[in-house]
Image: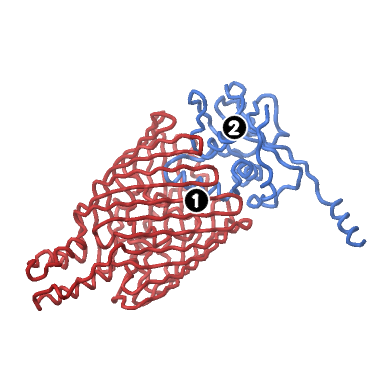
Chain colours: A red, B blue
Amino acid sequence: MLRLLSFLLTVLVMLPPGQHAQAFDLGTDRLRVSGFGTLGLTWGGKKDYGLQKEFIHDPQFGGVSILTDSVFGLQVDFNIAKNLDATIQAVAEDRIRQDFNNIVDWAYLSYKPTANSVIRAGRMGVDLFMLTEYRNVGYAYLWTHPVIEFYKPISLSHYEGFDFRYSRRIKPGYFEFKVFGGQTGSDIDVGSGELNLRMRPFVGFNTSLEENDWKIRLTYTTTDTAFIKAPADPLVNALNRVPQALWPQAAALHDQLKGVDTQTHYFSVGFSYDKYNWVVQSEFALIASRWASIGMTNGYLSAGRRIGPVTLYTVGSYARSNNQPRVDQNQIASADLQGLAIATQNLLNAVHIDQNTVSLGMRWDFHSRAALKVQWDHTWTRKHGGGLLELNKPLDHDITLNTFSANLNFIF
Amino acid sequence: MRLLIILTALILFLPHHALADIVVIVNPRSSITALTHHQIIDIYMGRNPGLANDQKLQPYDQALDSTIRSEFYYGITGKPVSAINAYWARLLFTGRASPPKSVANDDAILAIIEKNPIAIGYLDKRYLNDQVTVVYTIKRQNQEKPDTELQNTHLSDTLPVTEKP
């Protein structure tokens, strides 16, 4: 209830004065105020297995929630001078830390030195995968929420730094190349508590080629975890203190669970097709990292068919951890370490990911600035593969989960 | 025989609105005299059309819910206007570009193009005058207008073609 009130208060503070759309006609081409929002109802999760579409949200252990998908955003673009613009975007949504620093999602300056290039500096949206930059703008994509298996592991919303984008039409299509660098972080809810993450340097590039009806996109990003404060810190620190003679594997397990000073590489390839009545989109990623919580492969394929203002769609998605480290009991030389060994194995099981989802849904564009969507997700999670869920108890058997969501998406 | 009579009657009573083509227009003071299909797409989809000498054009849109807007975008991209609206939401809320400014109708488009040397707009060919230059034409078949802005699939076989102005 406190988080619902907190969300509603943030929305109220962000609402611009005036009751009509005309309030945004500010009589100048230099200033533009626009916004987006989602009013969503989600039914999902089970008593011991919480649904969490993004790590910043409270998990949902059954029942109906208005917070899971609801979001409200306001964006101000201001043309300062020829080729120089400023943009601020504020986003109100359920998050573990509802402070000014998190609400201001973007604040940057952009400069166009040539017609084909743009340089930006400030706080900007993370641009890892196809939807990461606009995951909050439900009106801009087909589904009720970004595919959980693909987008939930990216808990990063923005970064502080710069980017440079070059684009031009070449023979096969419209080409774009973007390079970026800076630092990022997030404050997320991992069930057992709050996890604070700071990553720097955060650098990468993406490149795309698109024609009117198709697009292909390749991305690479690398980052180093500079700081982490997590509920599992005491256990991880205890592993670090174990003498090698008593438990030789402890050092390797510490290395796979510590997070800090761990390099992570994100590779992805994406494809989309949109023409006449068909909408197809697919992405696959490899997240390479020693950190057991993050290293995984994931992907999805979505296909939709337009019938007048209605689009019917289906999505299939998966996520699997790259490795499944296990505690080797034979290596433990002291009975005093059994408790630590069990806790370590439980943590390894809890962060391991092995999950698939099939979704069916419908989007109805009933208005030029609003759409209504409904979606059913059927999820299979394997034993000790619930790293994308919030677990109240160890997942010692395979489970299935059903999630129903209904959203009203709008822009203004 | 009865079936034949019914079919004939249906054909006779079907409306035959002769829809004029959609023309893309600029100010006569502009050095641009013709644009390609790709350039029209790039201009109206927030990309750099790569015009000679990096010339700038400021695109204007018809009213958000107008039929001509949905037919224009369907004609150049093959996508329903709902997909175009979602596309522009992506561009706007990723800070890449702002959508073309909307005006009320053909008269308003004409008034802007006549005054603004870098403006570009589109309108029904029937409302053309000699104060503007046609740089691209989207052919429309003689048929009934689509019922909704979102379902104009009968335009799908009508590929846009350029016409010499």
> What residue is drawn where x is 64% and y is 31%?
B110
Q: Is residue A296 left or right of residue A76?
A: left
Q: Quadrant of residue B130?
A: top right
Quadrant of the image containing the N terminus of chain A: bottom left
- Residue B109 point in image, percent of width and height: 62, 33
Chain ID for label 2? B
CA distance for labels 2 and 1? 24 Å
> What residue is drawn where x is 35% and y is 59%?
A297
| Residue position marked by numbered label 1 in the rendering | A272
| Residue position marked by numbered label 2 in the rendering | B36
Q: Identify the element where label 2 is drawn.
A: loop
Chain ID for label 1? A
Depth check, front residue: A383 or A20: A383
Q: Amino acid under label 2?
A: Thr
- Residue B141 point in image, percent of width and height: 74, 42
- Residue A282 point in image, percent of width and height: 46, 55
Q: Is residue B70 left or right of residue B88?
A: right
Q: Quadrant of residue B160?
A: top right
Tell me the tag on residue A163. Answer: none
Q: Are marks 2 and 1 in contact (CB under 8 Å)?
A: no
Crowding around mark 2 (Cα neighbors within 10 Å: few <14, some 14 to 19, many 20+) is few
